[in-house]
Amino acid sequence: MRRTTSARNEIAPLLDRLISQLDAEGSATQRAYFLRIRRELERVRHDAELATPIRELTSTRAVGFSFSSDAGALIARILEKAEELGRDLDVAPHTLH
């Protein structure tokens, strides 16, 4: 549960800012994608359940979204945090071949 709380404390505020930024930019598809991940993160009750939202965040690059410089900076920070948490949880990022 400690990791769950830590993940929420570190990632959720960044996701909230990103979602607001994407909304302001009119990027509805990207906003919906990250809003879904944000809801999943909020529903997590046990450390093992963190794997799904962390994996989705670390695979964001593979989705192929284009971001503004403002949103890109937020994404970079979110991915940095997600990858740190993923290493702690031993979650391998998805890659496309």
Image (cartoon, grey):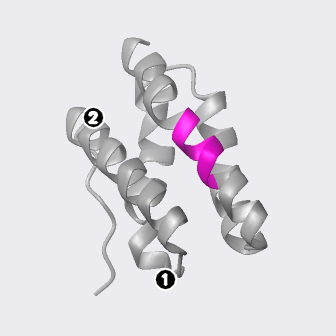
Residue pointed to by mark 2: 89
Residue 41: percent from left, percent from top:
58, 36
Residue 69, above or below 74: below
Of residues 46 and 33, the one drawn nearer to the viewer in this rendering:
33
Quadrant occupied by the N terminus? top left
Residue 55: percent from left, percent from top:
41, 53
- Callout 2: 10 Å neighbours few (<14), some, many (20+)? some
Q: Is residue 31 left or right of residue 80?
A: right
The magenta stretch spans residue 33: no
Label 2 secondary element? helix
- Mark 1 to mark 2: distance in Å? 25 Å
**Kind of residue sitting beneath label 1:** Gly
Q: Is residue 86 left or right of residue 34?
A: left
Residue 20: percent from left, percent from top:
71, 52
Residue 63: percent from left, percent from top:
49, 77
Residue extending farthest front: 70
Residue pointed to by mark 1: 64
Q: Looking at the image, which residue is at 78% across and 73% down?
A: 26
Label 1 secondary element? loop
- Callout 1: 10 Å neighbours few (<14), some, many (20+)? few
Residue 36, above or below 85: below
Label tally: 2
Residue 78 is labelled as none
Quadrant hosting residue 16? top right
The first of marks 1 and 2 along the sequence is: 1
Q: Which residues are magenta?
A: 13-18
Q: Looking at the image, which residue is at 54% across and 79% down?
A: 65
Please identify, in this view, whether the residue under mark 1 or under mark 2 is nearer the observer.
1
Residue extending farthest top: 2
Residue extending farthest bottom: 97
